[in-house]
Amino acid sequence: MNKTFRLLIANTVLIAASVGAVASASAAEVVVIAPSAPPAERFEAVPPARVGYVWDRGHWRWDHGRYVWIGGHWQAERVGYHWVPGHWVEHGPNYRWVAGHWA
C-alpha cells in the first residue's frame, strides 16, 4: 500500500471516529494528519493593531497531499479569552493539525 493511500485510509478512519465521538454535537471535528513535517513558517508582516480583533498568523495547511500556505487574517476578539494559534504537533511518524481556538 502506498503512503498516500494509507494516509487517505487513516484520515477516513479518524474522521469517522471523530464523527461518532461527537454525534450529539452540531458539528464534527475534522482531524488532519500529514505524513511529513510542514515547511518552515514564512515571514509575514503583522499589520498594525486593530481594536476588537487579534491577528491570526499564517500557517501551512495540508491539502490533497501537499502543504499550502494560508495567509494570516484577523479574528474578532472574544472578551475574556485569548487566541491560541493553530499549529502542527508531531504525532508518531506523522503530524497532526491543532486548529486555532479561543481559550
Image: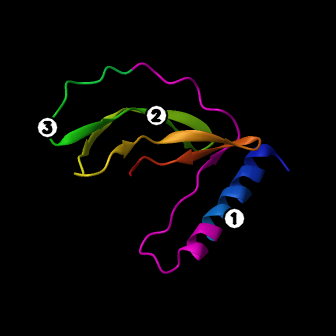
Q: Is residue 75 above or below residue 70?
A: below
Tag 1: residue type? Answer: Val
Considering every residue shown, the one lying at the far right of the view is: 1
In space, the residues marked 1 and 2 are separated at their CA atoms by 25 Å
User: What SS does tag 1 mark?
Assistant: helix
The residue at the point 42 percent across, 40 percent down is 85
Q: Which mark is residue 57?
A: none
**Magenta span main SS:** loop
Considering every residue shown, the one lying at the far bottom of the view is: 24
User: What SS does tag 3 mark?
Assistant: loop
Q: How many marks?
A: 3
N-terminal of the pair, mark 3 or mark 1, is 1
Nearer to the camera, 4 or 76 = 76
Tag 3: residue type? Answer: Val
- Nearer to us of marks 3 and 1 is 3
Q: Is residue 13 above or below residue 68?
A: below
Nearer to the camera, 82 or 2 = 82
Give, as a single range, the part of the protein colored magenta: 17-43
The residue pinned by badge 3 equals 51
Q: Is residue 14 above or below residue 103?
A: below
